[in-house]
Image (cartoon, grey):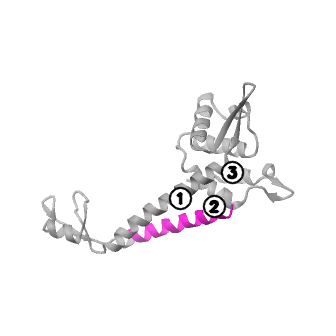
Amino acid sequence: MSLDVNLTDRLLQSPISFNGRLKESKEFIDVLDYGVTLLSPDNIVLKMEMLSLIIKKTRTLEKLMELGTKHAVQSSLYNLEQNGFITRKVKENIFSYEFNRTKILFKIKKDLETRYQQIKDVKDYYISNDCLFVCSHCKQLFDYAKAMEHGFICCGARISSFDSTSIVQNLMDKMVFIEEKLKALSKI
C-alpha cells in the first residue's frame, strides 16, 4: 500500500516547508509510506489524513474530529498511537497529539530488518535446495532427501520436480525493495 498522491502532495506543501525548502525529505516520506503499511487497513485513508495533519502540527482532538465520525476518528487515533506513529498528551482536559518521529522510524527500521532477514532465510533455503519436489495435491515441498525417503510419492501420487527460479527472483526483488527503504531511512 502506498500513500495516495493527494496525501504525498499535502505532505510536500507549504505547512511543512520553509522558504521553498522541504522540512520533511522525500526519503522521510518514502519511509513513512512504508510505515503506513504497518497499520490496520480499516479507515486507512482517514489515518493517512490524520497523520498528515498531525505532522503539519494540527494536533488537537477537536480539529481531528472534523475528519470523520467519532468512532472512526477515535479508533484511528488509537491505532496510530498503538503503532508508535503519534503520542497523546492531555493538558487541562484538552487532548493533543504529536507525531512520534523517533519512535516510528526506529519501529520501521526494526520491521524492515526483520523482514529482510526472513526473506533472506527463505531465499537461502531455495538456493541451497536447488533440487526440490512438490506434491500436486497437498502442495507440500520436499528436498531431494525427503523425496527419496517417501519414494517420490505423496498423497498416493508421484511428486514432481519444482523450479524455484521465479520464487528466488521474487524474493531478491523484495530484498532490493527493503534495501532501498533502509537506505532512505539512513539518510533521514
Q: How crowded is mark 3: few (under 14 residues within 10 Å), some or many (20 or more)?
A: few
The answer to which of marks 1 and 2 sits earlier in the sequence is 1
Residue 28 location, quadrant:
bottom right
Left or right of 32, for residue 142: left
> Is residue 139 visible in this depiction of the protein?
yes
1 and 2 marks in contact (CB < 8 Å): yes
At label 1, the amino acid type is Leu
Q: Residue at 49% across / 67% down in the picture? A: 175
Give the CA distance from mark 1 to mark 3: 26 Å
Q: In which quarter of the image is residue 95?
A: top right
Magenta run includes residue 87: no
Q: Farthest residue toward the right?
A: 19
Q: Is mark 1 on a helix, strand or loop?
A: helix
Q: Give the range drawn in magenta.
A: 167-188
Q: Nearer the viewer, residue 137 or 37?
A: 37
**In the rendered image, which quarter is residue 91 located in?**
top right
Identity of the residue drawn at 67% across and 44% down: 51
Q: Is the magenta stretch mostly helix, strand or loop?
A: helix
**Dot 2: element:** helix
> Which tag, 3 or 2, sits closer to the chain's start?
3
Residue type at numbered disc 2: Leu
Question: Which label lies toward us, 3 or 2?
Answer: 2
Q: Residues within 10 Å of mark 1 (few under 14, many from 20)?
A: many
Which residue is under mark 3? 6
Which residue is label 2 attached to? 185
Question: Looking at the image, is 73 positioned above or below residue 9?
Answer: above
> Residue tagged by mark 1?
112
Residue 3 seen in render: no
Q: Which residue is located at x 52 percent, y 69 percent?
A: 176
Picture coordinates of residue 75 (x, y %)? 57, 34
